[in-house]
Image (cartoon, rainbow, N blue to C red):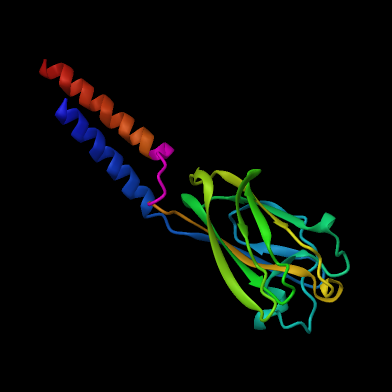
Amino acid sequence: MKILLVMFMAMFVLATAVSATAPSFSVDLHGDDVDCYADGYEFAGGLTGWGVPAMAGGYYGGQDYETFCLLIEPGDCTMGASTASVDVTATHTTNIVTIRYLDGISGADSFDAYVDGEFIGTVEAVDTGSEDWKEETFALPRTYEIGETLTIELEALGPVWDGCANWGQVAIDHIDFCFDPEIPEFSTTAALVAMVGGLAGLVLLRRKH
């Protein structure tokens, strides 16, 4: 029995270690004079609900306005136009997401994040004194293996600020997916490997008796 337990634990640790080596992949959001788009072959479809990019001439934390997209676009400043989503196919095992966003002078750049319809966290962006690009990391609802598709959705919380008509609101630069081995989850890979190890142990135990 002790041998079986040792084998089971060893196989589980091995499976976890394999998953922990997975590199990250990134979703870069860009804009042109017409719409917003994304780079990377990991996309399983285009952007949904993203408006036109930011307006030239704005400061936007010192970043080029063509290198990010907005949740609320200039000229459509209503909370009804405050949601954007994108479908992503994982190119590596992932269980966390990091969102790079602009905490601007509006004092109302906060937003909620959802994955596959499940709430994963809120970004509080209420600064009014400066424009700073920041990052926030959230755990995904589960581990996504290579080839699995997820939908990430961001929803601005408002209220709409008085400069929205000129500059829009809630700028998103890129979204990074990665794997954190410290998040406890018995992944599919780990489960399969551990199951094989357990069955092998049972066979050896039966032969011994």
What is the quadrant of residue 202 in the picture?
Answer: top left
Taking the spot 68% from the left edge, 70% from the top edge, the residue there is 68
Taking the spot 24% from the left edge, 26% from the top edge, the residue there is 200
Q: Is residue 72 left or right of residue 63?
A: right
Taking the spot 21% from the left edge, 21% from the top edge, the residue there is 203
Q: Is residue 190 left or right of residue 116?
A: left
x and y, in percent, of residue 41 in the image: 59, 57
Whether residue 63 can be seen here = no
Outermost residue, top side: 209
Residue 31, placed above or below residue 84: below
Residue 1, placed above or below residue 125: above
The chief SS type of the magenta part is: loop
Taking the spot 37% from the left edge, 34% from the top edge, the residue there is 191
- Quarter of the image where the N terminus is located: top left
Count the labels in the image: 0
186 within the magenta span? yes
x and y, in percent, of residue 36 in the image: 75, 65
x and y, in percent, of residue 157 in the image: 73, 58
Whether residue 193 can be seen here = yes
x and y, in percent, of residue 122 in the image: 62, 57
- Quarter of the image where the C terminus is located: top left
Residue 59, placed above or below residue 102: below
- Nearest the eye: 84 or 67: 84
Q: Which residues are magenta?
A: 182-189
17 within the magenta span? no
Q: Is residue 120 left or right of residue 188?
A: right
Q: Is residue 17 left or right of residue 1?
A: right
